[in-house]
Image: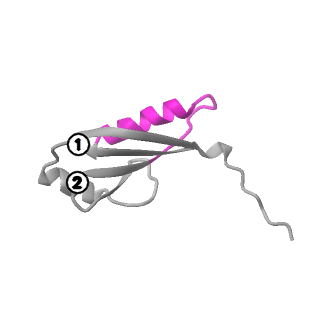
């Protein structure tokens, strides 16, 4: 499982586009992706969860899949930064006790 965070800005977003962004608002990671945005809906953070389909799937594959999820919204945008976390690498330390 990968968690991908894309920061960007919208380009010429109309009222219908702003409504679509507000409808997909949320702070969690989902496969369809969620947006957080500023008050004017001009800059955004898009959070997307991408399943690791094969053991050889890597961060580049996950970033491309997240960008495709963002593109599926059909909103004019510019990507400023992409960050990918491979959740398979996260170690959970349990308290002994």
Q: Quadrant of residue 10?
A: top left
- Is 76 in the magenta? no
Badge 2 or badge 1: first in the primary sequence = 2
Q: How is the image coloured?
A: one colour
Q: Which mark is residue 57?
A: none
For the residue pair 65 and 27, the one nearer the viewer reads as 27
Q: Quadrant of residue 95?
A: bottom right
Q: Is residue 21 above or below residue 1?
A: below
Q: Residue at x 43, y 32 (%)?
A: 64
View extreme (top): residue: 56
Q: Quadrant of residue 36?
A: bottom left
For the residue pair 9 and 47, the one nearer the viewer reads as 9
View extreme (left): residue: 15
Q: Identify residue for label 2.
A: 20
Q: What span is colored magenta in the figure?
A: 48-72
Crowd class of label 1 (few under 14; some 14 to 19; many from 20; radius 10 Å)? some
Task: Give residue 94's position: percent from left, percent from top.
Answer: 78, 62
Q: Secondary structure at mark 2?
A: helix
Q: Identify residue for label 1.
A: 75
Q: Are marks 2 and 1 in contact (CB under 8 Å)?
A: yes
- Is 54 in the magenta? yes
Q: Residue at x 30, y 38 (%)?
A: 71
Q: Residue at x 38, y 61 (%)?
A: 26
Assign the N terminus to one quadrant of the image.
top right
Assign the C terminus to one quadrant of the image.
bottom right
Task: Give residue 24's position: percent from left, percent from top.
Answer: 31, 56
Q: In the figure, is residue 14 to the left or right of 37?
A: left
Rounded to the nearest angstrom, the CA distance separating label 2 from label 1 is 9 Å
For the residue pair 38 and 68, the one nearer the viewer reads as 38
Q: In the figure, is residue 54 to the left or right of 81?
A: right
């Amino acid at each position: 499982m990968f968690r991908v965070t894309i920061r960007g800005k919208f380009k010429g977003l109309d009222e219908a586009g702003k409504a679509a962004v507000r409808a997909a608002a949320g702070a969690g990671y989902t496969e369809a992706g969620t947006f957080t945005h500023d008050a004017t809906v001009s800059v955004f953070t898009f959070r997307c969860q991408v399943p690791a389909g094969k053991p050889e799937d890597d961060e580049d594959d996950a970033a491309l899949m997240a960008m495709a999820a963002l593109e599926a919204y059909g909103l004019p945008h510019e990507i400023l930064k992409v960050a990918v976390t491979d959740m398979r690498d996260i170690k959970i330390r349990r308290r002994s006790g």
